[in-house]
Amino acid sequence: MTAFIIRRLVSAAITFFLITLISFVVIQLPPGDVVSNWVRQQEASTGQPMPPETIENLRRTYGFDEPVIVQYFKWIDGFPSGDFGFSIEYSNAPVADILVQRTGLTVFLGVATLFISWGLAIPFGIFAATRKNSRWDYFLSTLSFIGISTPDFLIAVIYLFIAVFVLKTDYSGGLFSQQFKDAPWTWERVVDFAKHLPVPLAILGLGGMAGTFRIMRANLLDILDQQFIEAARAKGLKERIVIYKHATRIAVNPLISRVGMQLPLLISGTIIISIVLDLPTLGPPFIRALNRQDMFLAGTVLMILAIILLIGNLIADIVLAWSDPRIQYE
Amino acid sequence: MDTVLEVSNLKTYFYIEQGVVRAVDGVSFTLQAGKTLGIVGESGCGKSVTSRTIMRLLSPSLARIVDGSIKYYPADGPPVELTQVDPYGDRIRDIRGNEIAMIFQEPMTSLNPVYTIGQQIMEAILLHQDVSKDEARARAIDVLRLVGIPLPEQRVDQYPHEFSGGMRQRAMIAMALSCNPRILIADEPTTALDVTIEAQILELIQQIQQDNDMALIMITHDLNVIGEVADHVIVMYLGQVVESAPVDDIFDQPKHPYTQGLLNSLPMIGRGDRLEPITGSVPGPHERPRGCPFAPRCPQVMDRCRAENPPSFVLGPASDVACWLYEEAAEPSHDSS
């Protein structure tokens, strides 16, 4: 097991290196660069063309006149000291400063969403599967179909509408009140944060629930048809023990392997919801950076997503090995 | 002789969208302690549904016991009418695995893949017996040794996927025997196994049966297995018992044309002549013939067979046959009920 984890860590490091390289290059592939985007913006606001020398100067100052591969190595050279480059879009602010709090909030929201959607989807899946073809089963399945086929951002708008106009909460988007937005962490800010949390968590959690519910229901129905379930009943076990100890235990395994892939999806997939709800996650700056080819910022976000994907998969593999003895890591 | 189980006129119907499937349609038999009843028939004749009805393992929303009775006679206490107990209740769960145990056709899928063999055997012991975990584990190792699993102290902590098919069936038998049941229902226990393993498993089951005075219901489509282990045989066709007789009579002088057909389609070493398969195939559940269920395939069919389903005619103290050919020869019914 230790050997397996070490081997996975080594391959994760290589994967990580390749992801940073490819994402850095791909962001720069479209014509133009961050400087030309910035210049166009300046020209639009001043109404005057910028002299070519000034533009060349800008490029030289930022080191954008060098080959992409040189820029790349200069970029990763700063990683050990916590320097992930700077963002032209955010007035030359260091990328690390822009992203550090957003990363924390994103991971927090992602993990909390996962717990909520699993905590609801698994019991509902068991409920529906053990009452197959009952009215409740049809009701939940129909609901999950609607959940899967409605785009996330639409769900976000609908839930927001319900939260504000039906349930009369005073939620108006975001995770903090105006005065706490850029404030340091104080007790008041934590309280404010906790007050803002329920609505976005409910929206994100319910959005991810439909798919997990369907997988759970289908898995459990498959398992309940197996011979060993009948054998467990023939032993004289209570139906509850047959369902939970013998069937559910196995039916959740595919969900565990899914979590590794779901975690970064939760984070990148919530970009639009984050924009709709004005959540300070990685989503909004990521979109902005991609639009403007702000490659240090975009590259760093992609890198963070890659790290989360790699960690998520590693955790999923380890948990799965513990949960399913048939899996052997040799 | 002690009767442990008495099934009479049992009818289990499945109510599905396409209609009613009469899976078990009037089955009767008596099971004695220490004896073996063989139930034989082709796929879909109702053998397995019969066994699951006795264990009350069928979902009540799907299968209904519409008629008949299943009387279980416990070692002490009054007889239990199994058709009347709640299939999810405490009474049937006390009996399941403890007094009536069952082994299944597919050893590869009969054990839960995520628990060790020991955990699964101990689960049954802890459920039915008032013992500590250590005692249960010792008992699990004992039964594994009893069923011939080498190094049971180590094997007890292994998972099913570390066992071969034959070893898994031995482990299943160990699990079934762990509480010393009075009745063992074996549903095609050797069908999925090699012939050499099959012989070992059958021998093992018989050995344990003799040691414990256990009654055995052996369900199989394989007449060779029946010849090997059974004392009494019932032959089923489309949910009905067409012939019931001691095992020697079944092989030496089969009465029902269906039994004769089964024997003629049996390959035997040294028998030079060609096999004679029964013509046609088992009709689907919704194409049940009006008269005798076997009439469309019967070589000796008469007009009456197509119109009227024959009752059971008594031919001897333990022999019945449901066929119009034997109406004349029949004795007055020995079972007037």
Image (tube, coloured by chain):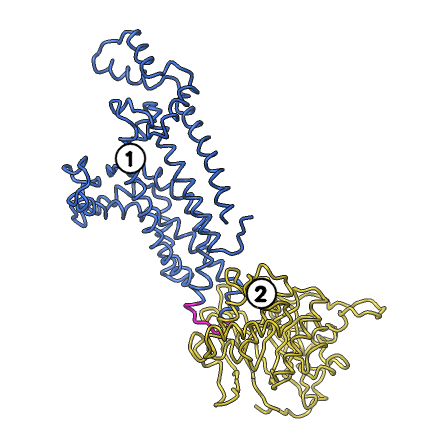
Chain colours: A blue, B yellow
* Parent chain of label 1: A
Q: Are marks 2 and 1 in contact (CB under 8 Å)?
A: no
Q: In which quarter of the image is the N terminus of chain B?
A: bottom right
> A294 and A185: which one is in front?
A185
Q: Where is residue A128 in the image (x, y as percent from the top left)?
A: 39, 59
Identify the element where label 1 is drawn.
helix
Say left or right for A181 vs B114.
left
- For the residues tagged 2 and 1, is the chain the same? no
Which quadrant of the figure has residue A63? top left
Q: Would you place residue A152 above or below residue A237 in this image?
A: above
Q: Where is residue B162 in the image (x, y as percent from the top left)?
A: 59, 59
Within-10-Å neighbours for mark 2: few <14, some 14–19, many 20+: few
Q: Is residue A123 magenta?
A: no
* Parent chain of label 2: B
Q: Mark 1 sits on what residue?
A: A100
Within-10-Å neighbours for mark 1: few <14, some 14–19, many 20+: few
Which quadrant of the figure has residue A227? bottom right
Which of discs 2 and 1 lies nearer the camera? The answer is: 2
Marks 2 and 1, how far apart at CA: 52 Å
> A29 and A157: which one is in front?
A29
Circle 1: residue type: Val
Range covered by the magenta-colored residues: A234-241
Q: Is residue A236 magenta?
A: yes
Identify the element where label 2 is drawn.
helix
Which quadrant of the figure has residue A110? top left
Q: Where is residue A211 in the image (x, y as percent from the top left)?
A: 39, 48
**Residue drawn where x is 27% and y is 31% of the image:** A98
Number of numbered discs on residues: 2
**Residue drawn where x is 84% and y is 68% of the image:** B273
Q: Where is residue B167 in the image (x, y as percent from the top left)?
A: 63, 65
Circle 2: residue type: Gln
Q: Which mark is residue B154?
A: 2
